[in-house]
């Protein structure tokens, strides 16, 4: 195990450590409660079991959940809780999620609900889970009426970002994680691309930790984590989820730059910086999906959850990001035109 970087999420008595590095999973046993006797591992069939940490002296059970958003459901939570009950898991025991964001969301919510809350440790195996989903305590599942509509804030006891796991992560999933990583360059004004990759993952975790510490329950600055997400959600809906979330975010970040420029918040040089990060640093040259009309995008952006009584976006400025509402439709349209022109 070389060069594991530890980042603390400072939440008072609920503070915890995120360990980032190759082989960091060996630290998982130090993150579980000392007196726990049973460890319930929640994972997926496609995730190599070498990423499941060893827990000596404990009874370990492995619970496989299905792959894909359809399995991120209350039915999966019920099944997991039944399995936990049948094997006698108590509040003194622990759930360990080993997987991407879907596994950490589902296992986290099962842990939050079972016995009204038992400890959970996340071992993140996808880039997105490392820099976003596994850190911050948001857990939940989908219902037919919408994504992530049922859930709980439930902070983990610790998080492992196992960088070894990126070797087997499917390439498209890696690119999706990079789309989310690109967004962090604009949440802080730092040269993240100067950092070696492991330190950059740790810095993204650190940025998320600072935001979560400032706004655990998403009343304010946590919205900055949604940079680029307003257009991204509209693209996902408009393509019937053909475009993956992280791909859509990589386009949404560029659109947010054009919109900020149209509103006079940033200059052309800062827009170019967005293109440099997305296209050059991360090689995310995703085209705008064909068949999605400007009218449909505007309509769907108006329904975004950040829209209160008008179009609302997280936008850049010389002083950093702001949540901006009351945006004029003509700015939204002219920024879309600029995006279409530049993406070709
Ligand atoms: N809680 C939060 O704050 C938060 C934030 C962002 C996203 N999310 C949620 O995260 C989910 C998306 O997470 P994701 O992008 O990690 O997708 P995912 O968890 O669905 O994983 C994508 C695929 O990669 C596989 N996989 C993961 N790690 C692997 C590895 N190392 N080797 C081989 N295969 C591997 C998975 O089995 C799956 O098939 C969504 O459900 C989203 O809502 C939650």
Image (spheres, rainbow, N blue to C red):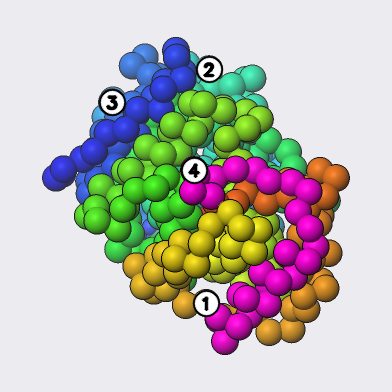
Residue 282 visible somewhere in the drawing: no
Instruction: Give the position of the C terminus as an image quadrant.
Output: bottom right
Q: Is residue 27 above or below residue 157?
A: below
- Which label number is shown at residue 319? 4
x%, y% of residue 75?
A: 72, 45
187 or 87, which lies in front? Answer: 187
Residue at numbered disc 3: 30
Q: Which label sits in the foreground, 3 or 2? A: 3
Residue at screen point 76% across, 54% down: 327
Residue at numbered disc 1: 286
Residue at screen point 62% across, 28% down: 217
Sort mark 3 into few (<14), some (14-19) or many (20+) by Cα contacts within 10 Å.
Answer: few
Sort mark 4 into few (<14), some (14-19) or many (20+) by Cα contacts within 10 Å.
Answer: few
Q: Earlier in the sequence, mark 3 or mark 4?
A: 3
Residue 139: which quarter of the image?
top right
Element under disc 3: helix
x%, y% of residue 9?
A: 41, 27
183 or 18, which lies in front? Answer: 183
Q: Which label sits in the foreground, 4 or 1? A: 4
């Amino acid at each position: 195990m070389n060069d594991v970087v530890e980042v603390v999420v400072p939440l008072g008595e609920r503070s915890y450590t995120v360990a980032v590095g190759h082989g960091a999973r060996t630290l998982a046993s130090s993150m579980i409660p000392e007196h726990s006797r049973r460890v319930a591992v929640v994972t997926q069939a496609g995730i190599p079991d070498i990423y499941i940490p060893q827990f000596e002296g404990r009874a370990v059970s492995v619970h496989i959940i299905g792959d894909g958003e359809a399995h991120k459901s209350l039915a999966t939570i019920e099944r997991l809780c039944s399995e936990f009950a049948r094997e006698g898991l108590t509040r003194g025991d622990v759930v360990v999620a080993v997987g991407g964001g879907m596994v950490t969301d589902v296992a986290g919510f099962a842990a939050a609900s079972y016995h009204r809350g038992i400890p959970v440790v996340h071992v993140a195996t996808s880039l997105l889970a490392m820099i976003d989903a596994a850190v911050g305590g948001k857990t939940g599942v989908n219902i037919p009426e919408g994504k992530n509509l049922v859930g709980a804030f439930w902070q983990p006891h610790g998080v492992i970002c196992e960088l070894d796991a990126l070797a087997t992560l499917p390439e498209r999933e890696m690119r999706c994680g990079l789309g989310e990583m690109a967004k962090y360059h604009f949440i802080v004004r730092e040269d993240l691309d100067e950092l070696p990759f492991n330190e950059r993952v740790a810095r993204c975790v650190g940025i998320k930790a600072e935001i979560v510490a400032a706004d655990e329950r998403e009343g304010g600055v946590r919205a900055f984590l949604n940079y680029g997400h307003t257009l991204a959600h509209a693209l996902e809906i408009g393509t019937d989820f053909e475009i993956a979330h992280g791909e859509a975010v990589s386009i949404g970040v560029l659109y947010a730059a054009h919109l900020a420029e149209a509103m006079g918040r940033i200059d052309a040089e800062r827009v170019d910086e967005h293109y440099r990060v997305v296209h050059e640093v991360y090689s995310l040259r995703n085209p705008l999906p064909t068949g999605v009309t400007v009218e449909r995008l505007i309509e769907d952006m108006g329904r975004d959850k950040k829209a209160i009584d008008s179009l609302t976006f997280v936008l850049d400025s010389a002083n950093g990001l702001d949540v901006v509402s009351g945006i004029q439709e003509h700015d939204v349209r002219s920024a879309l035109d600029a995006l279409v022109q530049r993406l070709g």
